[in-house]
Image: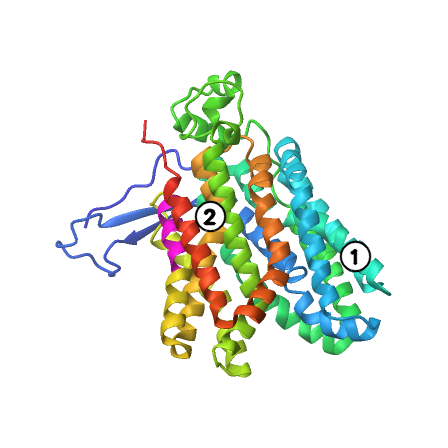
Amino acid sequence: MPRASIPARASQSTVHVFVCACNAPFCLPSCHRELLTLISVDTHKLRTISLIGLAQVVASASSQYLPAVISEPGGQALGISPTTFFVGVSVALVTSALVGPTVGRMVDKFGGRPMLMLSNILYAIGLLLLSMADGITMIMVANLVLGCALACGQFEAAFATLVMLFGKNSRNAITGITLIAGFASFVGWTVSVQILELWGWQGVCRFWAGVHLLFALPLHALIPAARQSEPALDKSVQGSGSPAGAAVTEPSRRMGQDDKRPGPATPIQSNRVKGILMAYVFAANAFVGMGLMMHLPGLLQVFGVSMAAAFTIGSLVGPAQVLGRLMDFFVMRKWHPLVGTRLAALTHPVGAALMLVFGTPFATAFVVLHGTGNGVLIMSRGTLPLAIFGALGYGRMQGWLMLPAKLAQACAPFLFGMALTDWGTGTLWMTGILGLSTFAALCLIKRSPAR
């Protein structure tokens, strides 16, 4: 059996694992195609992925999955409608959308670690204010602070941090943190419900505030500091055909393969049509994703699924999202992100069509198809801009691209609820058409030919 040799200049931070392509303990002569595959796992990158991924679990568990747990007991205690808590969520998302571009610029200037650490402090302050709320005013003030925390600490800032550290080699890292963060719903709901029974809704808020300060903040503090001269970024620039020295004097050459025009323009400015199409894709997906996150059990019940079964089937969204990200890593990682994203955009329309035509027997298939595609589409918010526009100014670019998406998320719970009330099962016609429109928009985004 042929032997694979360890590279002479291997870094000490690299672990080399030899894997037989046929997955057998001993290779047969017939296994002539790539008998051995050398998998180089950068332990530095793995450590960073683990730190950010675990912190993202805390961020999501204590924000987007928290209102479902505390809205009813909190509303009863304060004498207000549980809907008010969801209005607070919309306030936080709008705040996050408006602050996002500024945070992106700060990430580009100072690196991601300071902003992620700031997010933990803001989360803790916002959650403590929420725990002390005695009425609507304090709830809204707390959500304004939480909105700033979302802008500093959610996926967009995490993706930008990875790009600052690893440049255009960040795709697998982005996949890694979204895989870990996929368990946020399980952790958030399970832990929050247990704390609710012990300490009440205010205790839940205080618990997560403590987790941010004592667990997530130290995790973010261990992330390596990024510098503008980070080798990974320089490597990505050189890979596009530009000399390293020219990258400083000619910023446009660092923008990625899809930007051909010289000059000081940013990637988005040089590719406005692509930027608009991409922002629409993210906004439409965010609207459907947030709407179904809030109303999926109710939608399934409209189709005739029992309440217990609706919640059971709806809980498959999280595992299905993880499945989609695993498929991206093991099957689609060598493809251009546009290919996988286009396929993912079709899964929800296909599932909606099955549900509309065949009804409740295909409820599970609908949820799994939606979750699988949504998992890839959420991840594409990090990988697609990097592949199309490049690494230069990535944080600021993320802020602008995600602004419409966050506004769509803020409107989704209310508008989706209205559609469900007025249209019933016809709501899936709306989501299916939106899914097809995202596929069409993705098809209009063309990748430049290799140079």
Looking at numbered disc 1 in the image, what kind of residue is underneath it? Met
Spot the residue most to the right: 134
Residue 110 locus on image (x, y percent)? 66, 33
| Cβ–Cβ under 8 Å for marks 2 and 1 | no
Q: Nearer the viewer, residue 440 or 8?
A: 440
Q: Nearer the viewer, residue 362 or 411?
A: 411
Report the span colored magenta: 337-347
Going from the N terminus, do you reach mark 2 or mark 1 first? 1
Looking at numbered disc 2 in the image, what kind of residue is underneath it? Ser
Instruction: Give the side of residue 259 with respect to residue 394, left or right.
Output: left
Image disc number at residue 140 = 1
> In percent of the image, x 64 and y 55: which residue is there?
410
> In percent of the image, x 59 and y 39: which residue is there?
400
Q: Is residue 315 above or below residue 128?
A: below
Q: Is residue 178 above or below residue 318?
A: above
Image disc number at residue 380 = 2
Q: Is residue 87 magenta?
A: no
Mark 1 residue crowding within 10 angstroms, few (<14) / some (14–19) / many (20+):
many
Residue 258 appears anywhere in the view = yes
